[in-house]
Image (spheres, rainbow, N blue to C red):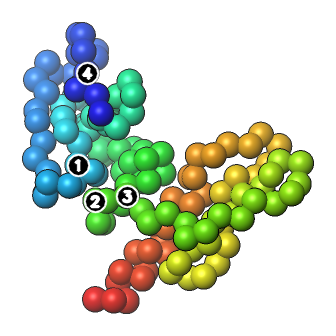
């Protein structure tokens, strides 16, 4: 985790950066720092190696945390990983993950440029695991 932004504030932003409070000790979703400026409130991602400011008004922070880091805005914890991985013996080694909630295989890595970024898994988990949580309440 990085300690926060270093150097001069960005153009158009107030110099003051506020520390945010987490809902609970293991809250991974809440930004550690926030600031205000013409585009609105922004949250600092302390999980990125170089950090970064993301608009909270336009949901950039929400999408970044959910789809880049796999952190649920509802539970404020990391999405559950696939219960099993399946790697195909094809030219790009397509990889699927088995969802424990719906018992479906979800594509994770596919296409000519193979990336293991799990964004497809996080998108599935955001919908599927949320639906499962709502049914259990």
Q: Which residue is mark 1?
A: 30
Whole-number angstrom distance, CA of label 4 to CA of label 3: 24 Å
Q: Residue at x 21, y 54 (%)?
A: 27
* Numbered mark located on residue 78 in the image: 3
Residue positioned most to the top: 8
Whichever of labels 4 and 2 marks the residue nearer the N terminus, that label is 4
Q: Which residue is mark 2?
A: 76
Number of residues whose C-alpha sits closer than 10 Å to that of mark 1, classed few (under 14), some (14–19) or many (20 or more): many
Whichever of labels 1 and 3 marks the residue nearer the N terminus, that label is 1
In this rendering, position of residue 78 left or right of residue 86? left
Tag 1–tag 2 contact (CB < 8 Å): yes
Marks counted in the figure total 4
Closer to viewer: mark 1 or mark 3: 3
Whichever of labels 1 and 2 marks the residue nearer the N terminus, that label is 1
Whichever of labels 4 and 1 marks the residue nearer the N terminus, that label is 4
Closer to viewer: mark 2 or mark 3: 3
The quadrant holding residue 79 is: bottom left
Instruction: State whether residue 12 appears in this view.
Output: no
* Numbered mark located on residue 5 in the image: 4
User: 50 above or below 132?
Assistant: above
Closer to viewer: mark 4 or mark 3: 3
Where does the image place residue 125, in percent across and percent down from the top left? 49, 67
Tag 4–tag 1 contact (CB < 8 Å): no
Q: Secondary structure at mark 2?
A: loop
């Amino acid at each position: 985790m990085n300690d926060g932004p270093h150097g001069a504030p960005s153009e158009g932003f107030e110099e003051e950066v506020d520390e945010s409070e987490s809902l609970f000790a293991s809250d991974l979703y809440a930004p550690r720092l926030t600031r205000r400026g013409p585009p609105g409130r922004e949250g600092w991602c302390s999980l990125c190696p170089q950090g970064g400011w993301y608009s909270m008004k336009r949901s950039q922070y929400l999408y970044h945390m959910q789809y880049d880091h796999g952190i649920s805005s509802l539970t404020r914890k990391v999405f559950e990983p696939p219960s099993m991985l399946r790697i195909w013996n094809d030219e790009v080694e397509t990889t699927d993950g088995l969802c424990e909630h719906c018992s479906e295989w979800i594509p994770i890595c596919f296409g000519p440029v193979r990336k293991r970024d799990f964004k497809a898994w996080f998108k599935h988990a955001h919908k599927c695991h949320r639906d499962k949580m709502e049914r259990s309440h």
